[in-house]
Amino acid sequence: MEWTREKRYLKYKDWDAQTLLNLQTQAATSAYQMHYHVHPLSGLINDPNGFSYYNGEYHLFCQSYPFGPVHGVKSWIHFASPDMVHWRYLGQAINPDSDVDNAGAYSGSGFVHDGQLLLAYTGNHRDENWVRTPYQVIARMDKNNKIVKDTDPIILPPEHVTEHFRDPQLFEHNGKYYIILGAQDKETKSGKIDIYKSDDLKNWHEVGYLDFSNENMGYMIECPNLVFVNDQPVLIFCPQGLDKKIADYDNIYPNMYLIGKNIDLAKAKFTPVQKAPKNLDDGFDVYATQAFNAPDGNAYAISWVGLPDCTYPTDNENWANTYSQVKRLEVKDNKLYQHPLKAIESLRMDHVAYSNQAHLTDHASSQYELKLSIKRNQAGKLVLNADTSMQTGLVLDFKTGDSSRLIIDRSNVGPKVNPDYGEQREVLLDPNKDLDLDIFVDGSLCEIFINNGAHVATLRFFADPENQTISFDHDIDYDADFWKMMPIM
Ligand code: FRU
């Protein structure tokens, strides 16, 4: 089936219910589906949106195209949760059914104000000649989860940006309201973060581009996101076309961050503690991470596990992509750590402890957590989701000595995933330490928390579901705990 533009932009009301039901069944019954992570009910999901705490629950919205594995006309779908682990699906939230968002309700954020959850998003408007105008729009959700869009956009694109001006994050800082947006400067065609300010959430004035680096940040910045972590500002963003000499990365587009000494939003100045941005994730597939400051004092982040302009093996099952688990952020000694939530432990069942034996199991199941401490001064391979003869599998090749490192190799585990961007990722580790790994596997998703969240590597891999062997390639000195994980939905 060919995904022509006409087809991708067909109005939602022009699709029939049976087609949608078939797509939902196909996604739900796929052997590669996730069962304890937010995943598509049908079609494609991309960026997390509106991640927030409102009315006694956590809320999460997702960019969604429900009718196929393509970036068609986007809407927001809604999930809510008491603990950011058990999510329930609440259906379509913002549909592309107004003039301002006729070609998609694009990414944005959630902000609680006056008893409502304000959802700031980009209305992707296209005229009859397919010329795009990005409008920044507010939709309001009440305590019954009913969402109504404001009639007028709050921000029109300024003269000095191209049509690439989107992904508003709305927040309050020092008694003023701010919106930061991803932008492409018209004159230099370079990626920027633009700041707007308001006293009343109605009248918005441009402050200007955020000064956060002396380097050129590529041709576009998507999904800029500012959070405060242990009192330090952390800027998360997706620079497209970034020169690898400025900051190295392997994915088609990186999701990066900078930790700040401080930020003066009114003066549009962010002073970073480090020179170059760093990859937020050391794996293959993380993009568009959204974090927010929750009322409990923590900053939480969730990532799209998928990349723009890439394809995945489930495209031929008509669905695509998934989300990471929610990660709690921490800054210590000017370093960023990402931790699994305590609440995810509530999914653990069937505990088994292992120690030093090379072979762990042939029946790991498709949903498990494996937590290991590999003692220092060793080298070897841990193979996950292998066949019993260990001919194929996801390989974690480690060395824990003076030049400690972990190589994650997905070259020999089922159908290839975007091999043009490499099939291995290397994480350099603190030398002469034990290697602590907390590995979460859910269907075709793997998340590896390394050394207590000093690194996270997230990836998709498409092992034959029958292949459930976990084994080292030889005897290794380690301790491990293994659990099967319960489904959440
Ligand atoms: C990032 C992105 C955003 C945009 C959204 C559209 O993945 O391109 O910039 O708002 O996806 O779905």
Image: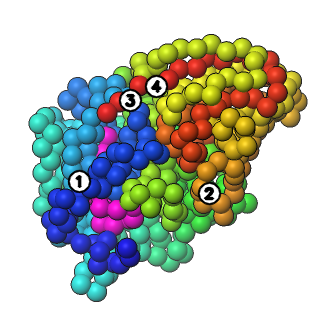
| Secondary structure category for the residue under label 3 | loop
Q: Amino acid at mark 3?
A: Pro
The residue that label 3 is drawn on is 487
Q: Position of residue 226 (x, y in %)?
A: 45, 44
Q: Is residue 3 magenta?
A: no
Q: Position of residue 188 (x, y in %)?
A: 54, 75
- The numbered disc on residue 485 is 4
Q: Amino acid at mark 4?
A: Met
Q: Position of residue 1 (x, y in %)?
A: 37, 73
Neighbor class of circle 4 (other Cα within 10 Å; few <14, some 14-19, many 20+) is many
Q: Earlier in the sequence, mark 1 or mark 4?
A: 1
Please state which of residues 357 and 261 is positioned toward the viewer in this rendering.
357
Q: Amino acid at mark 1?
A: Leu
Residue numbers of the magenta segment: 60-75
- The numbered disc on residue 416 is 2
Q: Cα distance, mark 1 to mark 4? A: 27 Å
- The numbered disc on residue 254 is none
The residue lying at 45 percent from left, 44 percent from top is 31
Q: Cα distance, mark 4 to mark 3? A: 7 Å
Please state which of residues 325 and 484 is positioned toward the viewer in this rendering.
484
Q: Earlier in the sequence, mark 3 or mark 2?
A: 2
Badge 4 vs badge 3, beta-carbon distance below 8 Å: yes
- The numbered disc on residue 21 is 1
Q: Earlier in the sequence, mark 1 or mark 3?
A: 1
Q: Cα distance, mark 3 to mark 2? A: 27 Å
The residue lying at 23 percent from left, 54 percent from top is 21
